[in-house]
Image (tube, rainbow, N blue to C red):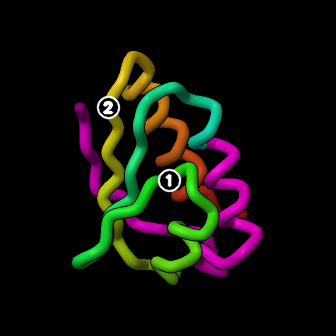
Amino acid sequence: MISKSITIKIPTGLEARPVALLVQVASQYDSKIYVETVGKKVNAKSIMGMMSLGIAEGESVMISAEGADEEEAVANIEKYLTSKN
């Protein structure tokens, strides 16, 4: 299992469209992937769970993954969350 703290750089934060794209990225991997904020941890492959976090640009989240492709999963999620789309 690996974990990494990531600061969100998507200008709109994680609203509907960016969450849907994040779920698509996470769903490409077999690993269990979670996004954690203060007091809340949700499955990164769940649109409803991710929407419930209400993460804004500049906030930090902890991404954790466990499985055969965990390193690649965290790397690509980090690439997505730190891009200024």
Residue 78, numbered circle = none
Q: Quadrant of the N terminus?
A: top left
The span picked out in magenta is 1-25
Q: Is residue 76 left or right of residue 2?
A: right
Q: Residue furthest toward the top? A: 68
Dot 1: element: loop
What amino acid does circle 2 point to? Answer: Glu
| 42, 25: nearer the viewer | 42
Residue annotated with mark 2 = 66
What amino acid does circle 1 point to? Answer: Ala
CA gap, disc 2 to disc 1? 12 Å
- Say if residue 55 shows up in the picture: no
Residue 2 position by quadrant = top left
Q: Which sits earlier in the primary sequence, circle 2 or circle 1?
A: 1
Magenta region includes residue 30: no
Q: Residue 83: x percent and y percent? A: 61, 57
Residue annotated with mark 1 = 44
User: Residue sitting at 47 percent across and 48 percent down?
Assistant: 78
Q: Residue 53: x percent and y percent? A: 46, 78
Relative vertical location of residue 15 with respect to residue 17 in this rendering, above or below: below
